[in-house]
Image: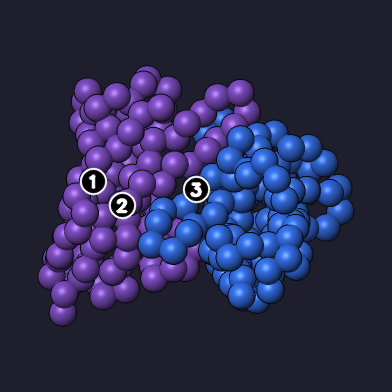
Chain colours: A purple, B blue
Amino acid sequence: DAKTTQPTSMDCAEGRAANLPCNHSTISGNEYVYWYRQIHSQGPQYIIHGLKNNETNEMASLIITEDRKSSTLILPHATLRDTAVYYCIVLIAGAGSYQLTFGKGTKLSVIP
Amino acid sequence: NAGVMQNPRHLVRRRGQEARLRCSPMKGHSHVYWYRQLPEEGLKFMVYLQKENIIDESGMPKERFSAEFPKEGPSILRIQQVVRGDSAAYFCASSPGTTRGETQYFGPGTRLLVL
């Protein structure tokens, strides 16, 4: 199973872009990169996912390096409500099971 | 379109009692996943179910814990003879069940406190 490495914490000024890195050097070719966040013990919220190409939706952008060994989640204009723990997850897919393995994530603090 | 619903949101039980946690998936979703989050830790996968079928229960404790997803009604996570170590937040997620590697959407969780 591919493991991910994220910084423990980051700060970002309100209104600026938040760039959250993730290393997943052992990712295999058919594993997706997923990002979720958890705001103060609420249920995890899906943000975005990708396989090879960069992805963008209304919440964020996901940049995956060409070798797929790392990725960056970009929140273009961070607000105070984006303060949360962000989880980078490589999806373990096999035999009909899709376990999401949550590590410690990155605690993002958006500063006024 | 209602999201994943869980009830109760908070549950207090004394040691030895039973806890029943319910999860109603999003409309149109036929796959349900249960996760547990112990205090100050990340979520840990417990079980993956489809209607009337347990697909993967590799994360379930061997004793006292069971899960079901009947043809009609919500998915139930049942904990018998609860102990203090069962105190945690239990989250349910659902997915459509139509494609590989599909997104899971989480409910608000049930916080179980065992006295």
**What residue is pinned by disc 3?**
B44
Q: Position of residue A39 (x, y in %)?
A: 39, 67
Q: Give the residue displayed 59% in from the left and 60% down from the top.
A: B86
Which of labels 1 and 3 is toward the front? 3
Whether residue B85 is visible, yes or no, is yes
Q: Which mark is residue A105?
A: 2
Q: Position of residue A76 (x, y in %)?
A: 21, 59
Residue in front for this viewpoint, A59 or A5? A5
Q: Give the residue displayed 42% in from the left and 22% down from the top.
A: A30
Given the image, on which type of amino acid does mark 1 rest?
Answer: Gln
Q: Position of residue A21 (x, y in %)?
A: 20, 45
Disc 1: which chain? A
Given the image, on which type of amino acid does mark 2 rest?
Answer: Gly
Secondary structure, mark 3, is strand
Q: Which mark is residue B110?
A: none
**Left or right of residue B110: residue A38:** left
Mark 2, Cα crowd under 10 Å, few <14 / some 14-19 / many 20+, is many
Total labels: the figure holds 3
Q: Which mark is residue A6?
A: 1
Q: Earlier in the sequence, mark 2 or mark 1?
A: 1
